[in-house]
Image (tube, grey):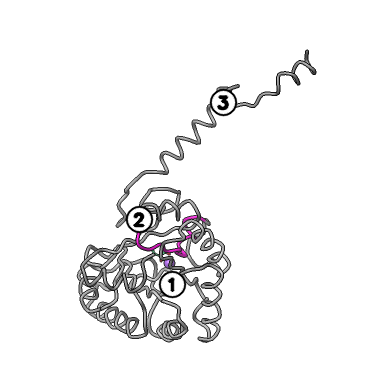
Amino acid sequence: MKSTSDFLKMKAQGEKIVMITAYDYPAAKFSEESGVDMILVGDSLGMVVLGYDSTMPVTVEDMIHHSKAVRRGAKDTFVVVDMPFGSYHGDVNSTLNTAVRLMQETGANALKLEGAGKVCVAIKKLTSAGIPVVAHLGLQPQSAGVLGGYKVQGKTAEQATKIIQDAKACEAAGACAVVLECIPYQLTEAISKELTIPTIGIGAGPHADGQVLVFHDLLHFGKHHIPKFVEGFAFVGDEVERGIKAYTDAVRKKEFPTIAHSFTMKEEALAQIYG
Ligand code: KIV
Ligand code: NA
């Protein structure tokens, strides 16, 4: 399993870090076997697999339930777990208690928190307790209500300057990496140069030290909204639809199951009963 120091080394050597989200055992296993560097159990699971329309309803219990399945499927990959909405904005000791619970119950390697400012106090607290923390700046879905929706962040000089300062503050607080979501590529390039810790981009252009995408987005697997910065690397949803329709048709047309799909009794039992 790669470690936070391997990720620092990869950045220093210009080697891209590949991250993907996963929410269950098969996705984690496929991802590990494909050789990704990091898996994120994102609170995007709220939209992608639980059918909510934002990440806000996702609870600590939800994160634990899914993260345990991911850990079972990817025993040998660095797993980052999102702290969900509302779970790290109270007093810093209760944040630490929740973080310890997430680490111990899921076997995660790191936790991810959105934002800087007061969140840097939590980053510092968790890091000093031995919990690696990934920061998350730019578009912060847990704050979409305050940000005025799911919009690109950092287009103006003022916003961009703020995001650069926040990134430096997260690094100073001890973050081991920072996710940059939906920011202009020039800003990603500037932050990536400025920081020693790796940046991991999503909708943030080619200059980040690593990339992350949502499993179901990059595979076009699901019925949720897929953001326009995503490339479809496979079209699994079409195949799932085709398969379910084929099964439905086969049962209705009495083509499935056949005797070939069935079990038979022992010869002597047949003779005894029907003989
Ligand atoms: O929840 C998530 O999937 C994320 C990524 C989009 C970075 O936070
Ligand atoms: Na998230």
| In magenta stretch: residue 135 | no
Which quadrant is the N terminus positioned in? Answer: bottom left
Residue 2, by quadrant, is bottom left
Mark 1 vs mark 2, CA separation in Å: 19 Å
Q: Are marks 1 and 3 in contact (CB under 8 Å)?
A: no
The stretch in magenta equals 35-49
Question: Going by the picture, which residue comes out furthest to the top?
Answer: 275
Characterize the local packing of mark 1: few (<14), some (14-19) or many (20 or more) Cα atoms within 10 angstroms: many
Q: CA distance from mark 2 to mark 3?
A: 38 Å
Q: Which residue is label 3 attached to?
A: 256
Label 2: state its secondary structure: loop
Q: Are marks 1 and 2 in contact (CB under 8 Å)?
A: no
- Which secondary structure lies at badge 1? strand
Front-most of residues 76 and 46: 76
Quadrant of the picture in which ligand 2 is shown: bottom left
Q: What numbered label is drawn on residue 35?
A: 2
Q: How busy is the neighbourhood of tag 2: few (under 14 within 10 Å), some, or many (20 plus)?
A: few
Which secondary structure, mark 3? loop
- Rendering coords of residue 6 (x, y %): 31, 70
What amino acid is labelled 3 in the image? Phe
* Closer to the eye: label 2 or 3: 2
Mark found first going from the N terminus, 2 or 3: 2
Q: Is residue 212 above or below residue 243?
A: below
Earlier in the chain: of badge 1 and badge 3, it is 1
Q: Tell me how many marks there are.
A: 3
Rendered location of residue 59, percent (x, y): 55, 68
Callout 2 amino acid: Gly
Query: Relative to 130, is 94 on the left or the right?
Result: right
User: What amino acid is found at the position of numbered circle 1 in the picture?
Assistant: Ala
Residue ID for mark 1? 110
Identify the image quadrant of residue 21. Answer: bottom left
Q: Is mark 3 within 8 Å of ligand 1?
A: no
